Amino acid sequence: MPQCSLRTFARDASGSVAIMAPFLALVSAGGMALAVDTGSAYYTQLKLQNIATAAAAGAVLAVPSEPHSVTAKALDLVALNTPSGFGTVAKSGDVRLGKWDKSTLTFTATTEDPNAVEVTTYRSTAYGNPLRVLFSDLLGRATLELQATSIAMVYGSPACTLVLDPSDSGALTVGGSSTVKANCTIHVNSTASSAAQTTGSGRVDAGRVCARGTITGGGWGATQLRQGTAQCSLQADPLAGVPEPVNPGGCSTPQNNTTTLAPGCYTGAFKLSGNVSLAPGLYYFKGAQVIVNSGTNVNGTGVRLYVDATSHFDLSGASDVTLTADTSSAQQAGILIFGSRSATTGGNVTLGGGGRLDLNGSLYTPSSTLTLSGNSTLTQERKTGVIIAKRLSTSGSSTLVLNGFPSGANAASARLRSSVVQ
């Protein structure tokens, strides 16, 4: 009877593949599931981070003027950036106002003069949207808990209007039946009593008015008021280093009732009337008294108006004025009206009249009063600059409208910027 060698039996592996195949299939399936789960977790975590970052960077722009709206704005941005199937990734408690300390790189939650927003997003059991995974099922775990946090701070000038006078009462005065409307901050450097005031039936509807002195009058509506040096820091003139335009020379006095002006130097007293057109360039007023007659319309694109200390530029008789600042100048780009730094406090630029003033560019009178009078409406809804004046006064039934968050093509020139810091 033949005998089988043990060595022969040991060499026979014909059934080993069949025995190992189920285990190899299980390992292969587990590996593929792990790869899928790893990719899914990575994508979900990255998406949660992007949602938090978009919400923080966008909502923080409202901190200087409308801090009460930050949570709603952040949650709106969260909703816009959340893919379907993610469920609710953030609630109101996941948006926090606070201060970001650049020296220590720390965030402290506070509603006192905040400069930052923290947003946290979740895929978790508590929110009813944990991430379902495959490989973890093999280990008895069906879901993963994920979260992401982003912090953004706001920088740049928070104010669309800056009143520079350091000590006088009434540095900002809204009087008569005039109205100032702004979705941004109006900042007053004066530490005096009644540094910012409404008189008569003057009214201010702004995101915030911040004065280093006291704020008086009853026309502030729902405007957030901050006053005192502890709440409002001294704001430096952001255009202080910009040189004044150079006199091009050859100063002349136009004839009265002229309707067309070319760039150059103008002196003496003269009146503008009819439909006045300004060609692009620099208009240097030296010892000039410029008066715009009643019913006059003034238009110009790419212009700069410089008013020296001995000049007075008066638009109070105008109907409609549409002027857009020159942006080609290397030094004074974006400044539409530049009042001399050697001017006295008395106003040498008077805006007003009976129509619409559409002035797109910065209005800069750092040593004198900028006055808006009559029943005109100065609308800067598309405005890309700021108003900086030693004093600012509105009277009559005039209306001043300011938009701190321009949209469309001008959005790139908005003053506030946000930066993701964590």
Image (cartoon, rainbow, N blue to C red):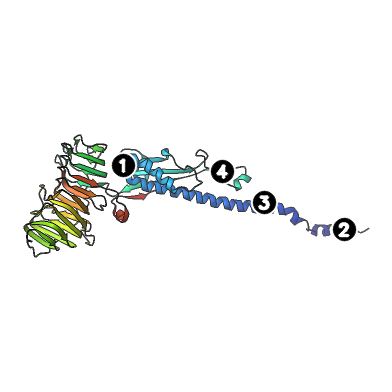
Mark 1 or 4, nearer chain start: 1
CB atoms of marks 3 and 1 within 8 Å: no
Q: Position of residue 1 (x, y in %)?
A: 94, 58
Crowd class of label 2 (few under 14; some 14 to 19; many from 20; radius 10 Å): few
Instruction: Please indicate, yes or no, whether residue 393 appears anywhere in the rendered image.
Output: yes
Measured Cα–Cα span from mark 4 to mark 2: 55 Å
The mark lying in front, picked from 3 and 1, is 1
Q: Are marks 4 and 2 in contact (CB under 8 Å)?
A: no
Q: Amino acid at mark 4?
A: Thr
Q: Earlier in the sequence, mark 1 or mark 2?
A: 2
Three-letter code, disc 2: Cys
Measure how far apart labels 3 and 1 are at the Cα level.
58 Å
Q: Earlier in the sequence, mark 4 or mark 2?
A: 2
The earlier-in-sequence mark between 3 and 1 is 3
Which residue sits at x=41%, y=48%?
Answer: 53
Write down the residue under mark 4.
143
Q: Is residue 245 visible?
A: no
Q: The residue tagged with tag 4: helix, strand or loop?
A: strand
Q: How many marks?
A: 4
Q: Is residue 245 above or below residue 218?
A: below
Disc number at residue 66?
1
Callouts 3 and 4 close, C-beta under 8 Å: no
Residue 318 lies left or right of residue 67; in this view the side is left
How far apart marks 1 and 2 lie (CA) works out to: 92 Å
Q: Residues within 10 Å of mark 4 (few under 14, many from 20)?
A: some
State the mark number for residue 4.
2
Q: Viewed as shown, does residue 318 lie left or right of 5? A: left
> Looking at the picture, which amino acid does disc 1 mark?
Glu
Residue ID for mark 3: 26
Q: Are marks 2 and 3 in contact (CB under 8 Å)?
A: no
Q: Quadrant of residue 244?
A: bottom left
Q: Nearer the viewer, mark 1 or mark 2?
A: 1
